[in-house]
Image (spheres, rainbow, N blue to C red):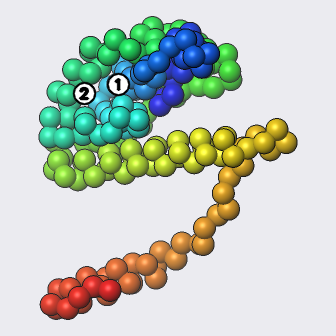
């Protein structure tokens, strides 16, 4: 969804150097909100922010998001979502018709909800960066070349160290 707007004629023109400064992210954000309603709020915010930041994740989230989605920017690549979805399908890709649940919970404490949305946003930005890097590091023989995996996560040990550090700070010591 975050790159749905790349399935437009205007984006193809951008790749040919004929267009500049296009917004390819708003169509996916609009589609998420239209297709999933309130359950699409977190997806919409993450998609909107994946290149421009999280301006739409503050206390006025739904009002700000509604404004952007109802009045897309002039430089959006395509406003007819059906065109983009059909081109996506032609490439053998689909967007789920429904979304069961959401990390955004209207009426929940704003800090908890915003943290969940920021985690979703972070995952999207990281995945987008890793895929872009793999594409540009690729070769004809290996179109996508990923960096080697890092060391395995030892979650129990990491939690133990975090709790130990927090306890030292609580007792008036210093965290290391």
Chain-order first, disc 2 or disc 1: 1
Q: Residue at x 73, y 44 (%)?
A: 138
* Image quadrant assignment for residue 164: bottom left
In the rendered structure, the answer to whether residue 128 lies left or right of residue 133 reads left
Mark number, residue 6? none
**Residue that carries the numbered disc 1 in the rendered image:** 33
Residue drawn 49% across the image and 49% down it: 126
Q: Quadrant of residue 29?
A: top left
Left or right, 94 with reference to 53: right
Image point (46%, 14%), residue name: 77
Secondary structure found at label 1: helix
Residue hosting label 2: 65
Q: Alpha-carbon distance for marks 2 and 1? A: 9 Å
Crowd band around label 1 with a 10 angstrom C-alpha radius: few (<14), some (14–19), many (20+): many
Q: Position of residue 51 (x, y in %)?
A: 41, 35
- Relative to 44, is 157 above or below? below
For the residues carrying marks 2 and 1, which lies nearer the camera in this image?
2
Decide: is 81 above or below 174: above
Image coordinates of residue 88 in percent, x first then y, are 60, 20
Residue at the right extreme, as displayed: 141
Q: Are marks 2 and 1 in contact (CB under 8 Å)?
A: yes
């Amino acid at each position: 969804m975050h790159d749905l707007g790349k399935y437009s004629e205007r984006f193809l023109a951008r790749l040919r150097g004929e267009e500049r400064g296009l917004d390819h992210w708003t169509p996916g954000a609009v589609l998420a909100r239209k297709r999933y309603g309130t359950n699409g709020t977190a997806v919409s915010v993450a998609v909107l922010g994946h290149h421009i930041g999280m301006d739409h994740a503050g206390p006025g989230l739904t009002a700000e998001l509604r404004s952007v989605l109802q009045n897309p920017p002039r430089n959006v690549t395509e406003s007819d979502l059906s065109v983009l979805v059909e081109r996506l399908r032609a490439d053998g890709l689909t967007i789920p018709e429904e979304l069961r649940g959401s990390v955004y919970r209207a009426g929940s404490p704003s800090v908890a909800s915003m943290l969940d949305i920021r985690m979703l946003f972070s995952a999207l930005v990281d995945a987008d960066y890793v895929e872009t890097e793999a594409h540009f590091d690729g070769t004809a023989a290996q179109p996508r070349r990923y960096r080697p995996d890092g060391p395995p996560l030892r979650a129990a040990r990491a939690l133990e160290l975090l709790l130990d550090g927090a306890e030292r700070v609580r007792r008036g010591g210093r965290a290391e």
